[in-house]
Image (cartoon, grey):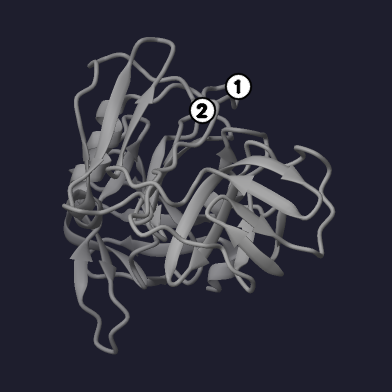
Amino acid sequence: MNIQTNAWVFQDTTTIGNGNVFKSGRNDQLTIYITNTANSFTVHFEGCDGETTPNWYPIPAVKLPELTIATSVTGNANQVFVIDLAHFAGVRCRVSAISGGTVRITGRVVDVGASLINATSPTPIQTALLHGTSTSDGTVATLIDSTKNLEVDSLNNRTIKFTVDNTEYIRTITSSTGDTIGFADTQPSSPASVTVTGSTGGSMVINCKTAGVSGNDYSVILVAGTGISQQGTVSFANNLLTITSPTNADGNPDQILPGNIEGIIQVDPELSEIFVVGTYEAGKPLDILSESVPFTGGSDGVIVVSGVDYVVF
């Protein structure tokens, strides 16, 4: 089956076995559906690296609608799970035990980038509004592209991403006019930490555990989910931790429970090595913030020189 069809059959079996391997490719997220007539079964979610003879590792999967996390499931009822494909070349659902019937495991690919919305606007966070290459030397807080003629403040509060000397910067745009885009200063240094709060009174703190890192090493952004009754997710790519809110039955962004974010970070080996969720008011959900929350930093500073590629979200 071609993975571009967005559907896949992992297992349809009455016996134990590894089943079919789904090659993740450029896909972001996979929803797994378990339906069965068996009296009992045990399924393990596993991902592999890109080696010729692949090595297999347990995958944390988020169960819907409970938002609990597990690397395997034992039961006799239909269930749904969501996994992040970013870290694995292939995924399988290994059946290690089954009795009294059939278990069928299917999957559907979800392009997360098509449904994430930057909290500063209704524009999908992975959809570029503007991109180009700086044509003149900028400063630590401006980028100049003489091929553009921007309306005054037309990009304000959007997010700009660019890379200088192999360091990626993600900044909130503070001004835009003509050929110049202004953003939060890339020079001042500060700890890689962010506090997320909401009008309901809840708050949480996400700290970077690595000593000595600057804001240019890691960033955090909070985005509003879309779609009817979607689960909240946490993803990490290009040193950017993206927290996506769940949605309600009307398809509107819902509030985030800090404990869910803490659980997802703790169970992911890569994230748990970098981030830790600090104190928060238990049981109080967080509203979706009105802007992204980048770390500021860069102990040595940077001049945005000509030839720097950039993209605006």
The residue located at (28%, 75%) in the rendering is 49
Badge 1 vs badge 2, beta-carbon distance below 8 Å: yes
Q: Amino acid at mark 2?
A: Thr
The residue located at (71%, 69%) in the rendering is 135
Q: Secondary structure at mark 1?
A: loop
Query: Can residue 309 be seen in this snapshot?
Result: yes
- Specify few, some or many for label 1: CA neighbours under 10 Å numbering under 14, 14-19, or 20 or more: few
| Residue 312, image x, y percentages | 65, 52
**Residue 237 shown left or right of residue 190 in the figure:** right
Eyeballing the image, is 230 above or below 178?
Answer: above
Number of marks = 2
Which numbered tag is attached to residue 56? none
Which numbered tag is attached to residue 247? 2
Query: Can residue 39 be seen in this snapshot?
Result: no
Eyeballing the image, is 64 above or below 114?
Answer: above
- Specify few, some or many for label 2: CA neighbours under 10 Å numbering under 14, 14-19, or 20 or more: many
Of 36 and 204, nearer the camera is 204
Q: Quadrant of residue 64?
A: top left
Q: Quadrant of residue 252?
A: top right
| Residue 27, image x, y percentages | 50, 63
The residue located at (49%, 34%) in the rendering is 230
Residue under circle 1?
Answer: 250
Q: Amino acid at mark 1?
A: Asp
| Residue 268, image x, y percentages | 23, 51
| Residue 40, image x, y percentages | 18, 46
Residue at the bottom extreme of this rendering: 52
Eyeballing the image, is 262 above or below 45?
Answer: above
**Residue 178 shown left or right of residue 128 in the figure:** right
Q: Secondary structure at mark 2?
A: loop
